[in-house]
Image (tube, grey):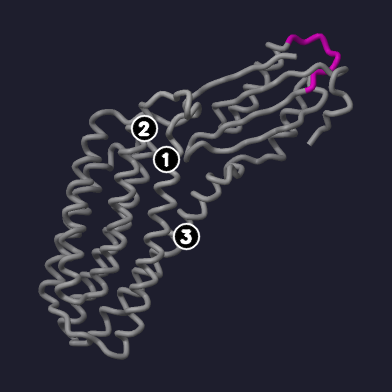
């Protein structure tokens, strides 16, 4: 009986320059989030409040990105032998849950206001939306180059990019209300932003729960993986095959392999197994080799 263990890193590390840019964008976005929530309460604009809810997801995403960088530098210890990277998933699930509550509240208020619109100072609404658009464009500019180097930064870049569209929506609402005087447009735009954000929030929550439940990663084809492993010369059968994610972008595999009578060493088998596993996009694996005559009654192909 023998065992093999392999490590690898499938995602690029964020350099110091990218981390500084993330901090700058986080500072700008947080400051504007506070300003937008304050303006939404003063102007009674649901569109602004809805966009602020979306801006909250940006702040959370940027914070998580920075936290993931910091946590990624911490070594595993006796209490957490896999390290601390799953905290990113816990934070994502929490943020998605909070956003669901906020989004449904905004939708509820919007439906009420459709029948009883509230006067809104469009000049203030327009000014805040312009500020939001500027902040988002600056953020996109700062993160664009880093998004090509790191999936972590790319996620933050896409969040800022999507919020830029929300700012455009508020600008359109302010302009239409100014020219038409129809206050219900604010509620319609708020509903539109909410309906657009909710599916993304649901996807985030679903993916987070899937990882927390140690589900099979979306991009891993278990049938193909099992067939490829079973076809390796010297492999009689495989069992106890498990694939899961520690966090986004870091998949883990454990496997028991029953060796047949071919004259192949365990190291040769492990080398071939590692090739198949890495081809599936998995760079952290633990493999146990078993003698055929010891486990022929237990092992069975899957």
CA gap, disc 1 to disc 3?
19 Å
Residue placed most toward the observer, 40 or 189: 40
Is 177 magenta? The answer is no
Check disc 1 and report the residue beneath it. 87
Q: Secondary structure at mark 2?
A: helix
The residue at the point 25 percent across, 87 percent down is: 117
Q: Secondary structure at mark 3?
A: helix
Residue placed most toward the observer, 6 or 178: 6
CA gap, disc 1 to disc 2?
8 Å
Check disc 2 and report the residue beneath it. 71
**Mark 2 or 3 closer to N-term?**
2
Residue 206, placed above or below residue 1: below
Residue placed most toward the observer, 277 or 5: 5
Left or right position of 251 against 90: right
Left or right position of 47 against 237: left
Q: Secondary structure at mark 1?
A: helix
**Mark 1 or 2 closer to N-term?**
2
Residue 202: mark: 3
Crowd tier of the residue under label 3, counting other residues whose Cα lies within 10 Å: few below 14, some 14–19, many 20 or above: some
Please state the extent of the stretch shown in magenta in the rendering: 258-265
Secondary structure predominantly adopted by residues drawn in magenta: loop
Among the 4 quarters of the image, the one containing residue 103:
bottom left
């Amino acid at each position: 009986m023998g065992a093999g263990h392999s490590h690898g890193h499938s995602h690029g590390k964020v350099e110091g320059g990218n981390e500084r840019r993330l901090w700058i964008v986080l500072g700008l976005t947080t400051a504007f989030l506070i300003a937008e929530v304050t303006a939404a309460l003063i102007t009674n604009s649901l569109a602004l409040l809805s966009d602020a809810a979306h801006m909250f997801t940006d702040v959370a995403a940027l914070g998580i990105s920075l936290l993931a960088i910091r946590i990624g530098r911490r070594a595993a210890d006796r209490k957490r032998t896999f390290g601390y990277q799953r905290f990113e998933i816990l934070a994502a699930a929490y943020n998605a849950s909070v956003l669901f509550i906020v989004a449904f509240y905004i939708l509820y208020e919007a439906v009420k206001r459709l029948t009883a619109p509230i006067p809104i100072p469009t000049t203030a609404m327009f000014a805040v939306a312009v500020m939001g658009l500027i902040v988002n464009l600056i953020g996109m500019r700062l993160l664009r180059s880093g998004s090509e180097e790191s999936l972590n930064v790319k996620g933050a870049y896409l969040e800022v990019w999507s919020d830029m569209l929300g700012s455009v929506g508020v600008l359109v609402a302010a302009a239409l209300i100014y020219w038409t005087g129809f206050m219900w447009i604010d509620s319609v735009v708020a509903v539109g932003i909410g309906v657009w954000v909710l599916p993304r929030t649901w996807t985030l929550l679903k993916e987070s729960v899937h990882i927390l439940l140690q589900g099979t990663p979306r991009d891993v084809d278990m049938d193909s993986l099992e067939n490829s492993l079973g076809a390796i010369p010297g492999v009689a059968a495989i069992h106890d095959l498990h694939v899961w994610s520690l966090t986004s972008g870091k998949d883990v595999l454990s496997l028991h392999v029953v060796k047949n009578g071919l004259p192949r060493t365990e190291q040769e088998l492990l080398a071939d197994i590692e090739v198949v596993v890495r081809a599936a996009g998995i760079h952290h694996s633990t493999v146990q080799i078993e003698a055929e005559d010891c486990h022929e009654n237990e092992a069975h192909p899957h």
